[in-house]
């Protein structure tokens, strides 16, 4: 038989039975959709981040930055303009300001070019500053009350470098006019922008924090090298392209892209496995046609190529449909969100279609080889179909046993309480791979034994419908086991993510509470007079939103141990009675601990340097002659920064430095679940003084929980790729099962079984399949989630989220039942007479 004729026969076979193309191509279409979607998402994120995050305009080629406290002076800026290849220099003044009516958070004040090729902003409303007292605001800051165009705002500015100002510098207050609102790089956030001259005057600085250089016809790297040589190592010189690459978040995008690729590859492998099983079933049912081809002269190689041609066609169509669908979805999403169109890379997306074709060929190869071995005499068989042999064989049994042994060995080595660090992560992944290799190899045998064990309990609960469902699961054990294994993989990944993130959330929250047990820390300048006067402290304590207020005095001194060892120390005076959590992680003395008059709490590093232990005595000295001695009552961790090196009660501190002002105030909120409730009251109670700095630790903990929630959603979305592929496999498996039993269903309908009973049988079959996959999946996910925590020492606290796992179990069963809707409806839709003459 000529190859061209066999090819035409294969094409006619695809046209005659398109449902087979749908069964084999649906899974590949889903994986191609996610593969193309991940490529479009990554390319779009790179472009969007490059546009939104870069604070360097296209007209700037080289950026010169001040190093440390040494700014660029006017003479240096003038010399930069004369450097070879430099066409122009734009100096930039930067510092921080407090904005009256906008809270106590400092905002960047940037004096830079707002017009021309070196401008990194775009006007949205109003006009750009052209007078000595005008500013423009970024959209993030202009959205606050009282920040509209034409309004007058008060700035409290200080000289400084970068977005954070030195709180020891003298404050300057100026009232300015908001002339407009601009679109700036998102990295700039909420900021105030003005001309360089304005910013320099308000900040009271004699120099510039940056100089933006334009170049002529010389390479930017060459100009940067020349400028670096002239200025020396005290100044940073970078090309604009280097800064844009850093600011664009390319490393973050690369990490996200890698993560997406890993999960898509897992889904692709799972889909290939499902497609391979489907091909085997379809070709076994098609054995009569293949045998007839052998009878009319087709050689084994031709039959094999015919099967692979059908597989390639399935992969090509599925890949093309999945890729085009992903592109359409990306355009729809960006259109709805009002974003620029997606970045489309034709070569990369063509690769998605090629990957789909190769995956289809790889999946069909074992079935094609089996088809080539079909004997011509099989065409004479009266049996229209036969089931794939479910015996696992000696090789599969040995492979499964070996994988199981490796998995158990690794669990014993890196399980909870075992190895830590990178070994825990690698060992957990290797153990999971080995265990799922065992499930793939021994799946049919495990399924047959499980169905035999479930027969009586299920029959007692569901009657004849359940008994038939259990029997049907065991009739095609290899196919059902393959589908269940892939579904178990998806559920295991979901449970692992839930356990790992819940444990990290608990561990990080506990660690942050131990390190920062208060909700707000109010600091004043460390030197000179303090803005935290007794009146200010009393006003804060009188707020109904504050639960506890602990004033802290601070002085630099020397601590001396019993053996004469001395070391400089940050000595603080505070009364921890209102906030006992300050000493929650401290190691007490053997006689009971606590902090009383004549006692001190010292840091771990200071205790080691002085060679003292709880119960020993130390001497404290400060400049000016103050001296005292104290018994070491507590030793606190070094990361308990609120306690400094030495903490004593206020009465003892007064003996050392009786005139030391309050430098900090520790505050806890009445509503600890809502630490942001303190923002507005503190804004009203505190004076507008740039030397005051507020840190909202409670909000940092809330932000951490929000970040972990976002990570949970993202991770579940990624593992959902595998779950969706698994559910497609469930639908295909149940469809094949229903199709194979079409004649059998016809007989049952003919003897009086109603369509609702047939639907019940298939629904029970789907539910049992989901239960068979979900219970081991949740169990293994909990185990591997706990094992993965070994890679995060000190950052996690093993927490099993039973509620989330229960929802996962119920949700998996619901999704499996949802995937069975079409097969269930189809099973009872065929009339008894049509089913009895069906050719399966």
Image (cartoon, rainbow, N blue to C red):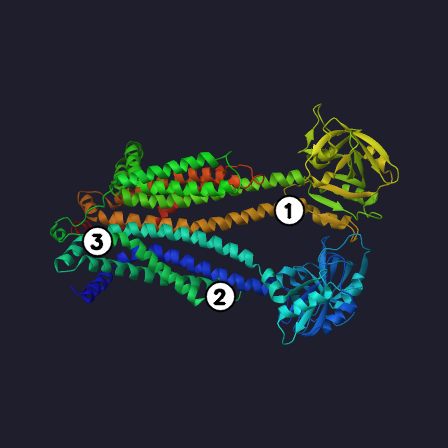
In the rendered structure, the answer to whether residue 722 lies left or right of residue 220 reads left
User: Residue visible at 30% across and 32% down?
Assistant: 453
In-front residue for pair 710/554: 554
Q: Position of residue 48 (x, y in %)?
A: 55, 63
Q: Residue at x 15, y 55 (%)?
A: 291
The numbered mark, 1 or 3, whose residue comes first in the sequence reads: 3
Evaluate whether residue 547 shows in this view: no
Furthest toward the top, the residue is 591
Q: Residue 700 got which mark? A: 1
Give the number of the mark in front: 2 or 1.
Answer: 2
Estimate how packed mark 1 is, as few (under 14), some (14 to 19) or many (20 or more) residues with alpha carbons within 10 Å: some
Mark 1: secondary structure: helix
Of residues 395 and 465, the one drawn nearer to the viewer in this rendering:
395
Q: Considering only vertical position in the picture, is 805 above or below 295?
A: above
At numbered mark 2, what does the secondary structure look like: helix, strand or loop? loop
* Location of residue 455 with respect to 758 vertically, above or below: above
Q: Position of residue 299 (x, y in %)?
A: 17, 59
CA neighbours of label 2 inside 10 A, class few (<14), some (14 to 19), many (20+): some
Q: Give the labeled residue for mark 3.
A: 371
Kindly report which numbered mark, 3 or 2, lies closer to the viewer in this rendering: 3
In whole angstroms, how far apart are the C-alphas of marks 1 and 3?
Answer: 63 Å
**Relative to residue 392, is residue 107 drawn left or right?**
right
Q: How many marks?
A: 3
Q: Which residue is mark 2?
A: 343
Residue 520 is left or right of residue 406, and the answer is right
Secondary element at image label 3: helix
**Image quadrant assignment for residue 656:** top right
The quadrant holding residue 186 is bottom right
- Residue 647 image position (x, y, % from top left): 76, 35
| Among numbered discs 3 and 2, the one appearing first in the sequence | 2
Alpha carbons under labels 2 and 1: distance apart:
35 Å
């Amino acid at each position: 038989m000529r190859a061209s004729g066999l090819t035409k026969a294969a094409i006619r076979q695809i046209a005659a039975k398109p449902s087979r193309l749908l069964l084999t191509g649906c899974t590949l279409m889903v994986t191609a959709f996610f593969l193309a979607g991940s490529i479009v998402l990554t390319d779009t994120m790179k472009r969007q981040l490059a546009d939104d995050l870069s604070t360097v305009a296209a007209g700037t080629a080289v950026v010169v930055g001040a190093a440390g406290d040494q700014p660029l002076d006017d003479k240096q800026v003038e010399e930069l303009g004369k450097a070879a290849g430099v066409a122009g220099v734009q100096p930039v003044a930067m510092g921080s300001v407090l904005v009256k009516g906008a809270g106590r958070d400092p905002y960047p004040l940037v004096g830079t070019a707002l017009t021309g090729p070196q401008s990194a902003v775009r006007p949205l409303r109003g006009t750009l500053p052209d007078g000595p007292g005008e500013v423009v605001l970024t959209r993030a800051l202009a959205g606050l009350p009282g920040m509209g165009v034409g309004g007058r705002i008060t700035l409290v500015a200080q000289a400084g470098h970068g977005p954070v100002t030195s709180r020891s510098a003298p404050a300057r207050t100026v009232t300015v006019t908001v002339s407009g609102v601009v679109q700036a790089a998102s990295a700039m956030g909420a900021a105030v922008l003005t001309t360089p001259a304005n910013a320099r005057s308000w900040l009271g600085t004699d120099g510039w924090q940056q100089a933006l250089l334009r170049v002529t016809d010389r390479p930017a790297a060459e100009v940067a090298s020349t400028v670096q040589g002239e200025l020396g190592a005290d100044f940073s010189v970078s090309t604009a392209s280097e800064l844009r690459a850093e600011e664009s978040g390319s490393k973050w995008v690369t990490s996200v892209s890698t993560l997406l690729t890993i999960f898509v590859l897992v889904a692709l492998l799972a889909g290939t496995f499902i497609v391979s099983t489907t091909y085997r079933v379809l070709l076994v049912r098609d054995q009569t046609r293949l045998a007839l081809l052998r009878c009319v002269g087709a050689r084994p190689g031709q039959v094999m190529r015919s099967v692979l041609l059908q597989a390639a066609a399935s992969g090509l169509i599925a890949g093309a449909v999945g890729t085009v669908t992903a592109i359409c979805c990306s355009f729809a999403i960006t259109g709805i969100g009002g974003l620029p169109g997606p970045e489309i890379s034709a070569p990369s997306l063509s690769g998605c279609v090629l990957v789909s074709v190769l995956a289809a060929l790889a999946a069909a190869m074992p079935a094609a080889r089996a088809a080539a071995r079909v004997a011509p005499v099989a065409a004479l068989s009266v049996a229209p179909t036969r089931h794939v042999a479910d015996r696992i064989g000696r090789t599969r049994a040995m492979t499964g046993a070996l994988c199981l042994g490796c998995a158990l060995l690794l669990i014993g080595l890196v399980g909870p309480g075992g190895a830590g660090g990178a070994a825990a992560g690698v060992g957990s992944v290797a153990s999971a791979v080995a265990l799922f290799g065992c499930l793939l190899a021994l799946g049919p045998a495990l399924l047959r034994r499980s169905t035999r064990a479930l027969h009586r309990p299920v029959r007692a609960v569901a009657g004849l419908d359940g008994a038939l469902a259990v029997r049907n699961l065991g009739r095609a054990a290899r196919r059902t086991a393959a589908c269940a294994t892939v579904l178990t993989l998806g559920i295991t990944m979901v449970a692992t993510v839930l356990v790992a993130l819940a444990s990290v959330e608990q561990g990080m929250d506990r660690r942050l509470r131990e390190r920062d047990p208060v909700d707000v820390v109010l600091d004043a300048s460390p030197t000179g007079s303090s803005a935290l006067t007794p009146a200010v402290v009393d006003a804060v304590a009188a707020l109904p939103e504050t639960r506890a207020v602990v004033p802290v005095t601070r002085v630099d001194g020397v601590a001396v141990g019993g053996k004469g060892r001395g070391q400089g120390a940050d000595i603080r005076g505070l009364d921890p009675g209102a906030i006992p959590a300050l000493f929650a992680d401290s190691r007490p003395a053997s006689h009971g601990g606590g902090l009383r008059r004549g006692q001190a709490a010292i840091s771990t590093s200071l205790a080691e340097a002085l060679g003292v232990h709880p119960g020993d005595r130390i001497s404290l000295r400060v400049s000016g002659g103050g001296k005292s001695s104290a018994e070491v009552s507590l030793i606190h961790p070094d990361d308990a920064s609120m306690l400094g090196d030495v903490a004593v009660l206020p009465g003892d501190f007064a003996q050392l430095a009786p005139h030391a002002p309050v430098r900090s105030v520790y505050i806890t909120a009445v509503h600890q679940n809502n630490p942001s409730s303190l923002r507005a009251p503190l804004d009203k109670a505190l004076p507008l003084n740039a030397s005051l700095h507020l840190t909202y630790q409670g909000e940092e903990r809330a932000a951490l929980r929000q970040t972990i929630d976002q990570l949970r959603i993202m991770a579940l979305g990624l593992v959902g790729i595998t779950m969706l592929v698994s559910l497609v496999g469930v639908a295909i498996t149940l469809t094949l099962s229903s199709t194979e039993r079409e004649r059998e269903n016809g007989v049952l309908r003919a003897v009086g079984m109603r369509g609702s009973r047939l639907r019940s049988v298939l629904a029970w079959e789907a539910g049992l399949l989901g239960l068979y996959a979900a219970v081991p999946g949740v169990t293994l996910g909990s185990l591997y989630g706990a094992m993965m925590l070994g890679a995060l020492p000190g950052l996690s606290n093993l927490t099993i989220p039973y509620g989330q796992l229960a929802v996962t179990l119920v949700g998996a069963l619901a999704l499996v039942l949802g995937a069975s809707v079409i097969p269930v409806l189809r099973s009872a839709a065929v009339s008894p007479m049509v089913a009895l003459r069906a050719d399966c």
